[in-house]
Each structure stands twice: as C-alpha cells, then as structure tokens.
Amino acid sequence: MDFLQLAKRRYACRKYTDRKVEREQLMQILEAGRVAPTGANRQPQRIVVVESKEGMERLARCTRDFGAPLAFIICADTTEVWRRKYDGKEISDIDASIVTDHMMLEAASLGLDSLWICMFKPEAVREEFGLPEHIVPVNILLVGYGDGAPASPDRHDEMRKPLEETIFWEQF
Ligand SMILES: Cc1cc2nc3c(=O)[nH]c(=O)nc-3n(C[C@H](O)[C@H](O)[C@H](O)COP(=O)(O)O)c2cc1C
C-alpha cells in the first residue's frame, strides 16, 4: 500500500475491542516515533506508555479513553526544545506532533486503529503520571483494534476542504 492510500485509510477510531496490542507492534510504533525528525534534532519528546488496566483507569481520569487498550502520552521536555531566535517561539508542540503523526501512521500500517487526543486535562495527566514541571503533555494517542466498521478511505472527498480553499500559489 502506498503512503497516500495508507493516509486515506487511517481514521479517528472512537470505539475499540478489548484485544491487546502485541508488544512487537507497540515497539514498532515507538520506533517510528524515535526516527521522526525534530527541530535541530533536539528530540524533546518524552513518551509515557500506558497499557495496564490500572494505567488506563488513571488515563480515564484525564480524558475519554474510548475503551482503547493502549495509550501513548506524548510530552515535550521544555529544557531540550529548540527556540527560534527571532521571536523566541518554542517548537515543542510541533516536535511532539511530528512524533505523534509518525506513530499514528505506523499504527495504521500495522493494521491498528488510533485516536489522536488533545482534549485532556493537562494537570490531571501531570498528577496521574508523575510528570515533572518541565515535561509538558502535548498529545495522547490511543491505539487498538477498532470495534465496528472503519471509516471509508473515500470520505475525504466530502470531509476535507478542496485544495483550492487551502493552497495559495506564489502569494496568499
Ligand atoms: C491535533 C488533533 C487533536 C485531536 N483531538 C481530538 C480529541 O481530543 N478528541 C477526539 O475525539 N478526536 C480528536 N482528534 C481527531 C479529529 O477529530 C479527527 O482526526 C478529525 O475529525 C478527522 O477525522 P478522521 O481522522 O477520521 O479523518 C484530534 C485530531 C488531531 C489531529
């Protein structure tokens, strides 16, 4: 399957079976995140893996878990992140999100389903998973086997804006 086919097949899965994700697949997902590019190669990502029943119960106190058997909390170490000298912009969210995207698409390539979550309580995540002050939770990625029919790869025809609305050639 080529990349575009894979990207179109992936969808936001909001219902999972209780089938566990194999350790080998989990490690492959982590490896995809490891090789992701980050600004100045600083690699500020810090990832908490949650796969135990007890851990998922703690996660459920921070966000909806949709019954997933596995979650990654992708954080950024603010002491390691690259800053743009012109305006001081920190790129931790960008770095953590590229890592998350690599992991999400690797999961899809392994036949797994996933959900990217930003709607979580940051302070609850900090408390439940023992994050120190300089570690900021950016994304949560749920992974597992979807329960029910997957979304159609053709849905983008209607669910995504046409290129004419978002692309500007040469000038905005
Ligand atoms: C940065 C980001 C944050 C998201 N946060 C949430 C979230 O908190 N809760 C949720 O149910 N879905 C969340 N989603 C999933 C999107 O709603 C979903 O990807 C989008 O509606 C497109 O649907 P599709 O992925 O099935 O094509 C998020 C996706 C992205 C990329």
Image: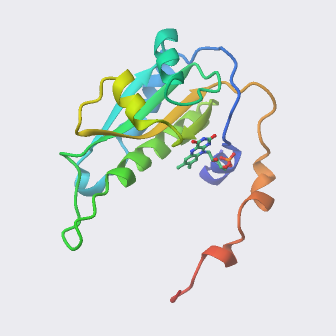
Q: Position of residue 168 (x, y in %)?
A: 57, 82
Image quarter of residue 113: top right
For residue 84, above or below residue 126: below
Q: Position of residue 75 (x, y in %)?
A: 35, 38
Identify which residue, 154 or 51, lies in the foreground: 51
For residue 23, above or below residue 133: above
Q: Position of residue 158 (x, y in %)?
A: 80, 60
Left or right? Give the position of 11 relative to 171.
Answer: right
Q: Position of residue 54 (x, y in %)?
A: 48, 10
Name of the residue lying farthest toward the bottom = 171
Image quarter of residue 32: top left
For residue 75, above or below residue 3: above
Residue at horizontal 68 percent and vertical 23 percent from the top: 16
Residue at horizontal 18 percent and vertical 69 percent from the top: 85
Left or right? Give the position of 6 relative to 27.
Answer: right
Q: What colouring method underlies this structural image? A: rainbow
Left or right? Give the position of 117 relative to 154.
Answer: left
Residue at horizontal 51 percent and vertical 89 percent from the top: 171
Identify which residue, 139 or 146, lies in the foreground: 139
Identify which residue, 80 or 58, lies in the foreground: 58
Please state the total of marks drawn on the protein image.
Answer: 0
Q: Quadrant of the N terminus?
A: top right
For residue 163, above or below residue 31: below
